[in-house]
Image: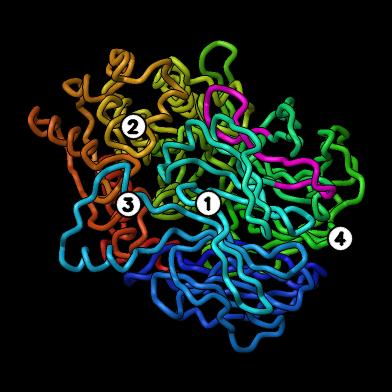
Amino acid sequence: MRRPSDVHMSPDGELVAYVVRPVSREGEHWESSIWVVPFAGGEPRQFTSGLWHDEQPRWSPDGRLLAFLSDRAERGKASVYVMPRDGGEAIRVFEQSGEIAELRWSPDGRYLSFLMVEPETEEEKQRRERRDDARVWDTDWKFRRLWIVELATRQARLVSPERVQVWGYAWAPDSRRVALAISWSPRVDDLYRETAVAELQVEEGSFRELFRMRGLAEDLVWSADGEWLAYRGPAGRVVHGEYVFRRRVDGGEAECLTPSYPGTVEHLGAYRGGEQLVIVGYEGVNARVYRLGWDGERRLLCPRVEGSWHGPVSGSADGERWAGVWSDGEHVPDVWGWRAPHDISHSEPGNGAESVDLLRLTQLHPEIEAKLCPVRALEWESDPGVQVQGLLVLPRGEVRPPYPLVVQIHGGPTSLWANEFAGSWHDWAQPLASRGCAVLLPNPRGSTGRGTEWVNALFGDVAGGEFRDVLAGVDFLVAQGLADPERLGVSGWSWGGYLTAWTVTQTNRFRAAFMGAGLCNLISDNNLGDIPSANLSYFAHTPSEDPEPYWERSPIRYVARVSTPILIAHGEEDERVSPCESIQFYRALQLLGKPATLVTYPREKHGFEERQHQRDLLMRILAWFAEHLDFPAPERTAAPASLAAQ
């Protein structure tokens, strides 16, 4: 299956550039291509060949050039290229290749900028070749730093300081200053601790820290007058950028622009060069797009359609035309556009938002859409007065309820199941439903999409309320006659894998379980994973200071209670959740004579990339639940439609 991403609209609103990439790779390197489609309609045009990994298309401010990253010079390492608007030969404008991200134009079009991880030195290369390459932890760091290239001369400069990690950045409207979101090491764990925002003068090279904060300032945006910065940041204990804040560049405290927003802001951008802001937020299971004033006034920018925007949206310079990647439960991701309504209040129903239609600009997989199963939004009561939301994917055709039911618990836990296409190695709802099995996708306490109180509800209660929320959803479907109480399964990836392991140690009502990249021991996970500070979003102290709360909510403590057959899978190079977590749980179950199977995947990290591994994993999940919940198993040689189309 191919998926579009990274949409970027030309300043005049006439053309939309985007990337098309398969969901998996066959060889060592990714292959992707850049496409361009007219906003007014017409056939998409392939802009690059697809022989290499081409990504991050960015129109120049005058719309004459399209810049992008490509590894065509050295596979697996990107460099910077530009092409004329109408196509032609790609021109390389940066002579080095490396780990490059965040490609941008300066507002005046003079510079291209990007972040690049410091390359290996010649001495380091020689040591590696001699195998004299011992690494001292937390000292031999490679920092991600800011580069700029003057397009006219192709002269490149490294402009950010040494030993400062740049996570994100934004050009000021005057093209003389850049705001940087920074930390003092490249450890991902720093993003859950203290970071800073700094200002860099491009010509002079001067660098000054503006302010520090807990968590990261995500999606930095300058105001049009250059006096304010906006960013996403946390509002509660959980470090997640769910709210929008503003600060004066010359000093002052942070001011929240979305204090009463009922959902979670996932993306922030500029409207008309920073005159206002654009936010993509999730409210329940659906995404909304708003225009946000610097005073906090919020107005709908996109028609109120049910579904999800995958990533940020991109607009024309005048703010009239917009595009992004959209899907819902019964449509695969495609590029869609719309013309912005001029004056729609967020608080007035029937105000015209419904009259503005989305325009479908691509249709990558009509053959998959024709086979998708129906999806419905649900709400049920858990604890008294606690309403939980989620989605239910139902079999189509002649299968009648009560259905076998598999619960898939999302990762995070600061994430959610959204009204979007769910049919991949990681989201197996549609493949299961196509075999006659219903799938419940719950958003229990700790999920995003319902404001900061819901996100922060796990503090001091990990695997408590969220566990009850999941079971209450199953009870609701059984009571409705939709789920067969004798054919229930539970599953999840990452945090969902953890809650799956917890579930099978607390109840025997499920006939089968799948634990993917999950953790079983909250104490060992704290020391083996790459984001131990994230635990302080949910616990008052570290496990070194107070281990008992972690041990109390660790599935491994109760492993002797397990009677549910469980399939466990993990990537062997996972740095987020160590494969030791799955091995621990499997070994304990094996020694106790419990029914368990462990499968590990070489070279894979927390998210799987290789095509054969994705197929193998999904086929194992389908076969596992088919065997234990008594529904038709797929043929081992036949991949589900969502993967067969790759």
**Residue 161 numbered tag:** 1
In the image: residue 72, left or right of residue 276: left
* N-term-proximal mark, 3 vs 2: 2
Residue 639 at x, y percent in the picture: 35, 63
The Cα–Cα distance between marks 3 and 2, rounded to whole angstroms, is: 17 Å
Q: Secondary structure at mark 4?
A: loop
Residue 230 at x, y percent in the picture: 72, 40
In the image: residue 388, left or right of residue 227: left
Vertical side of 433 occupied by 446: above or below:
above
* N-term-proximal mark, 3 vs 1: 1
Q: Secondary structure at mark 2?
A: helix
Q: Residue furthest bottom?
A: 88
Marks 4 & 1, CB-CB < 8 Å contact: no
Amino acid identity at mark 2: Tyr
Marks 3 & 2, CB-CB < 8 Å contact: no
**Which residue matches tag 2?**
498
**Which residue matches tag 4?**
318
* N-term-proximal mark, 2 vs 4: 4
Type of secondary structure dominating the magenta stretch: loop
